[in-house]
Amino acid sequence: MADPVTHAGDDPSGRLFVLSSPEELARAAAGRLWGIARERATVLGRTGKGTKRVSLALSGGRTPRLTLAALSSEPYRDRFPWDLVHFYQVDERWVSPGDPASNQRMLRESLMSCAPVPPDHFHPVDTSLPDPREGARRYEETLRRAFRGTPGDFPRFDAILLGLGADGHTASLFPGSVALEEETAWVVQTEGGDPPAPRVTLTLPVLNAASQVIFLVSGKEKARVLGEVLSGRGGELPASRVSPRRGKVTFLADAAAASLLGGKSPPARRAGGNGRGKEDGTG
């Protein structure tokens, strides 16, 4: 993986890793997911207590699609602990599962149908229900069953994969949305996008309870907002409000998305492939 970019005023915390292309970004993200799942599986194997489950929440979009395609291919396909990992949705448009805009459809096409994911390890939002409000309520019930006994008020995902919109939105949490102020629910109905459409999304408290949050940022149209979020100038932008109390946030960006950041980005190194140190996606 690329070395962290730490130029003054950009990302002094070292949370940002820059990759040369969308394809390298996807491979780096797949390597990081593999590293997180592998590490968690090792810990679960040592403790021998409770249900052995690794929980990953996935977003829709082109960059996550490339990432999941990489994860379901070698070298990760044969190394990933598929039997332990449960996959959840970060958000969903209120469309049928067969609709081209459906995140569920993307996840099934890019991962579930290509990798040995046990059928009951994918937990999609049910958009066949009467309305998004009921869909949100039912999905929260699904999460509460899965995370029963978890300490704290919100589920602690091992990793959440997020995107970053040019307007600063993430998940289906858009600027100015009342959903941003939700403090108790795990899942809510909302509306947003261009054109606006009804959606179901995890809430900020759930995102901020995760062990690890990984933002995938690709394309020059994201360059301005990426700089704002990393520098703290983003203020109340939804993505700027993702800050896990006991977790870690990482930004993986391609060169185009990082093009407005000051200084010269280091050369990217390919993530994954040899299973050592930073190259396995865990560094």
Image (cartoon, helix red, strand yellow):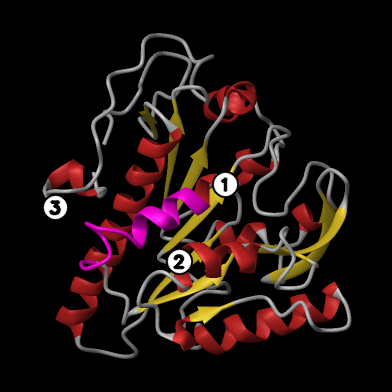
Q: Amino acid at mark 1?
A: Arg
144 in relation to 57, above or below: below
Which circle's residue, 2 or 3, is located before the other in the chain?
2
Pointer 3: what residue?
275
Which residues fall within the magenta stretch?
65-79
The quadrant in which residue 238 appears is top right
Q: Give the Cα distance between marks 2 and 3.
A: 21 Å
Asked whether the viewer can see residue 202, the reply is: no
| Callout in the foreground (2, 3) | 2
Q: Amino acid at mark 2?
A: Leu
Residue 118: x percent and y percent? Answer: 40, 84
Q: Residues within 10 Å of mark 3 (few under 14, many from 20)?
A: some
Mark identifier at residue 22: none
* Quadrant of image for the N terminus: top left
Between label 3 and label 1, give the one nearer the viewer. 1
Which amino acid type corresponds to the residue marked 3 in the rendered image?
Answer: Gly
Q: In the image, which disc is placed on residue 62?
A: 1
Between the residue at mark 2 and the residue at mark 1, the CA separation in whole angstroms equals 13 Å
**Tag 2 near tag 3, CB within 8 Å:** no
Most foreground residue, 230 or 23: 23
Q: Is mark 3 in CB contact (under 8 Å) with mark 1?
A: no
Up-down relation of residue 230 to residue 263 (above or below): below
Q: Counting residues from the N terminus, which is met first, the one under dot 3 or under dot 1?
A: 1
Mark 2, residues whose alpha carbon is within 10 Å: few (<14), some, or many (≥20)?
A: many
| Percent x, y of residue 46 | 15, 79
Q: Is residue 165 left or right of residue 75?
A: right
Query: Residue 14, position in %: x, y?
Result: 35, 30
Q: In the image, what residue occupies the spot 36% across and 30% down?
A: 19
